[in-house]
Image: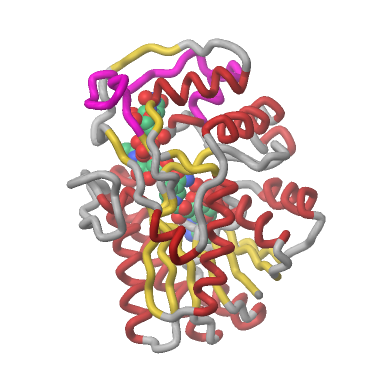
Amino acid sequence: MRVLLTGGAGYIGSHTLVELLALGHQVCVVDNYANSAPEALTRVRQISNRDFRVEEGDIRDRDRLTAIFTDFRPEAVIHFAGLKAVGEGEEKPVAYYDTNVTGTLVLLEAMRASGCGKIIFSSSATVYGNPLYLPYDEAHPCSPTNVYGRTKYMAEQVLADWVRANPGTGAVLLRYFNPVGAHVSGRIGEDPQGIPNNLLPFIAQVAVGRRAKLAIFGDDYDTRDGTGLRDYIHVADLARAHALALDYAADHTGTEVFNIGTGTGTTVKEMLAAFERACGHALAYEVVARRPGDIAACYAQPEKAERLLGWSATRDLDDMCASAWKWQSENPQGYRSEE
Ligand code: NAD
Ligand code: UD1
């Protein structure tokens, strides 16, 4: 299939690209490198030994996007491009709505102009907001508690309305839980700029000596050891979910939402212990105050993805930590040392 990936140079996009190339898809990446580096794509070429098209550009650039679409004529789009830092979204709401919502609107126009009717969208478990019950299933009400989550939920609704108005089109909305880990080669991985917001990249930087210790945000939650519990999903499993979603979209019209998680939760302390096993040494930490806005626990009911996509997670916590450690230890400064 001819597939266009917005944000394909990013963390999840680059891993999905490897998966799609291995399956023989023809791919075009559109990325403005706002939060990524061309080096990631160079490495994808090395890993996969296949070439693909790359267009440096902003998804909000209507003329450019339409020109790329009318030339490449994708049969489907996987829409990863977006801004994703929760704290930054509170400070720069307009930038977040512009990239995540306006960017999606411009993309849909380019799709229409080129006759492309199938889209897979990177959504997030954050659209659910505070849990009314756990695990979250896809019927759980959506009430996002931050700007980032609202932009994602708005984009979901835009896509569903577009599909309703355009018979024959289809959207697959994937609500990711907590993507972590790296490609087994250690050549590509998550490369956050500045201080990592998320747990696993922070732990990895402690392990490699870039940071002194992990701050555990609260140990008085109602969980088995008092620390926050999340549903971590290996990025390679997540990449495979996109390939299966493409197959599903090819055969179906309408909008379908899927949770992409393992269905089990891991606490901060359990994750720290798993990473210590992977890197082979103890990691320093201190318990500090809760992070504002955090919830005690968040995990998926992933049964629908198994039933309709034939997808379930196959990699465990040790795979996640071993691959994250390989990436971090072999690329202590991420992609930057190569540029
Ligand atoms: P990422 O920042 O690594 O990748 C996003 C990519 O989009 C980057 O390469 C960036 O340069 C590009 N981009 C940003 N704005 C753009 C624009 N205007 N035009 C063109 N390209 C642009 O993030 P990721 O972790 O790979 O996430 C991918 C998607 O998945 C995002 O939409 C994110 O909201 C969603 N998501 C991520 C997580 C997570 O924890 N990583 C969880 C749930 C959902
Ligand atoms: C965060 C985002 C969420 C996004 C998700 C994707 C916030 C408030 N939420 O959620 O929107 O969809 O990432 O991966 O940012 N922790 C520490 N110390 C740290 C970092 C994290 O103790 O330095 C704890 C947190 O309190 C939490 C757990 O680790 O209990 C996981 O945190 P994180 O990786 O930031 O993910 P989420 O909180 O699930």
Q: Position of residue 112 (x, y in %)?
A: 48, 84
Which corner quadrant holds the N terminus? Answer: bottom right
> Which residue is drawn at the image coordinates 68% and 47% (left, top)?
40
> Quick check: 299 left or right of 108?
left
> Quick check: 126 left or right of 57?
left
Which is more toward the observer, 119 or 261?
Answer: 261
Above or below, comparing residue 25 to residue 40 in the picture:
below
Above or below, comparing residue 218 to residue 141 in the picture:
above
**In the rendered image, which quarter is residue 256 located in?**
bottom left
- Magenta-span inclusion, residue 173: no
Q: Position of residue 89 (x, y in %)?
A: 33, 46
Give the residue at the far bottom of this rendering: 167
Total number of numbered discs in the rendering: 0
Colouring rule applied to residues: secondary structure
> Which residue is drawn at the image coordinates 66% and 42% (left, top)?
183
> Which residue is drawn at the image coordinates 52% and 39% (left, top)?
180
Residue 292 makes an appearance in the image = yes
Which corner quadrant holds the C terminus? Answer: top right
Above or below, comparing residue 1 to residue 301 in the picture:
below
Q: Position of residue 14 (x, y in %)?
A: 62, 52
Give the residue at the far left of this rendering: 132
Q: Which image quarter has ligand 2? A: top left
Range drawn in magenta: 201-229
Which is more toward the observer, 180 or 80?
Answer: 180
Above or below, comparing residue 232 to residue 71 in the picture:
above
> Quick check: 330 left or right of 67?
right
- Magenta-span inclusion, residue 227: yes
> Which residue is drawn at the image coordinates 44% and 82% (left, top)?
169
